[in-house]
Image (cartoon, rainbow, N blue to C red):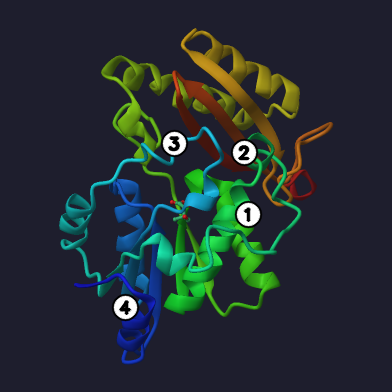
Amino acid sequence: MKKISTIKEFRKWRKNISGSIGFVPTMGALHEGHLSLVSKSNNICENTIVSIYINPTQFAEGEDLDTYPQMVQADLDKLSKYEVDCVFLPGNSEMYPEGINVGNYDNNLFDILEGKSRPGFFKGVTTIVAKLFDIVEPTHAFFGEKDFQQFCIIKQMVSDLNYSIEVVPCPIIREENGLAMSSRNKYLTESEYSIAATIFKALESGKKLLKDGELNGDKLKREIYQIIKSEPAFTIDYVSVASGDTLEEFEGELSGDILVSVALFLSKTRLIDNFTYSSPDLHNC
Ligand code: PAF
């Protein structure tokens, strides 16, 4: 497993790599969720490249850039158990040689859901992912569905900017108590960690309503909201029932692909989670 921290050295190494190349971009503090992406890349691609870089442009003022967990040696130890050809570990001067700024790319998914709560977040994400795509030149890139909107935005960017990359979605991996895995879970105290299980319970209850035929999005939201609210420690940012295609909030009856997502704070830790559901096509019944 090669470790490279400069673009120049990476490009020299990359020149001699042929065949399909799976890319897993990360900000480190790797958990089973990240490793499932690596494993999927190993299954699909001949080569796998992982990047570890905490991207400053996707953190707003007052967010956790300075405290974001860093544990590079532990990350490398975990990756060494997989078939990882190269780990790219650049610093800020490599990724932002002209200073910390963002690119021009924008699409119509930037300002809703996560983008509404975290303005500038997707500018930062697309800036760094485009830079990494230009350096790594992968054939496949792997993104977790916990960040469902991020996955949709990257897919759209790949199409808009004509990258020849297949963007592969990977299912959410959960802790034993149902909490979606996230590097930010490291911020949680033991009691917050058990309280956080309520998020999954609320989503599961919402999913059951859908399966039972509920087509009223407001009713679905209320059910999820109330279960989360039963834990006073949560501050809810949003509960959303949106189209899984456009990510626009549903008005009226639910139909087609549905994305149910939540964002909330547990103390200072911001957690997100979601599920997607395809409502049965009534016309075929
Ligand atoms: O999902 C993440 O960890 C980050 O947003 C990403 C894609 C590595 C870009 O910094």
Q: Viewer-nearest of labels 4 and 2? A: 2
Query: What residue is drawn where x is 46% and y is 73%?
Result: 140
The residue most toward the right is 252
Q: Dot 2, crowdedness within 10 Å: few (<14), some or many (≥20)?
A: some
Task: Measure the alpha-carbon separation of dots 4 and 2.
Answer: 34 Å
Is the CB atom of the residue marked by disc 2 within 8 angstroms of ligand 1's nearest atom?
no
Q: Which residue is mark 4?
A: 47
Task: Measure the alpha-carbon separation of dots 1 and 3.
Answer: 17 Å
Sequence-wise, which precedes: disc 4 or disc 2? 4
Mark 2 element type = loop
Is the CB atom of the residue marked by disc 1 within 8 angstroms of ligand 1's nearest atom?
no
Question: Count of labels shown?
Answer: 4
Sequence-wise, which precedes: disc 2 or disc 3? 3
Q: Nearer the viewer, residue 48 or 253?
A: 48
Q: Which quarter of the picture shows residue 1?
A: bottom left
Sequence-wise, which precedes: disc 1 or disc 3? 3
**Residue type pointed to by label 2:** Arg
Q: Which quarter of the picture shows residue 105?
A: bottom right
The residue most toward the front is 98
In the rendering, at what x and y percent does residue 3 appear? Answer: 23, 71
**Residue type pointed to by label 4:** Asn
In the rendering, at what x and y percent does residue 24 appear? Answer: 39, 63
Q: Which residue is mark 1?
A: 123
Kindly indicate whether the residue at mark 2 contacts the one at mark 1 (C-beta within 8 angstroms): no
Q: Viewer-nearest of labels 2 and 3? A: 3
**Residue type pointed to by label 1:** Lys
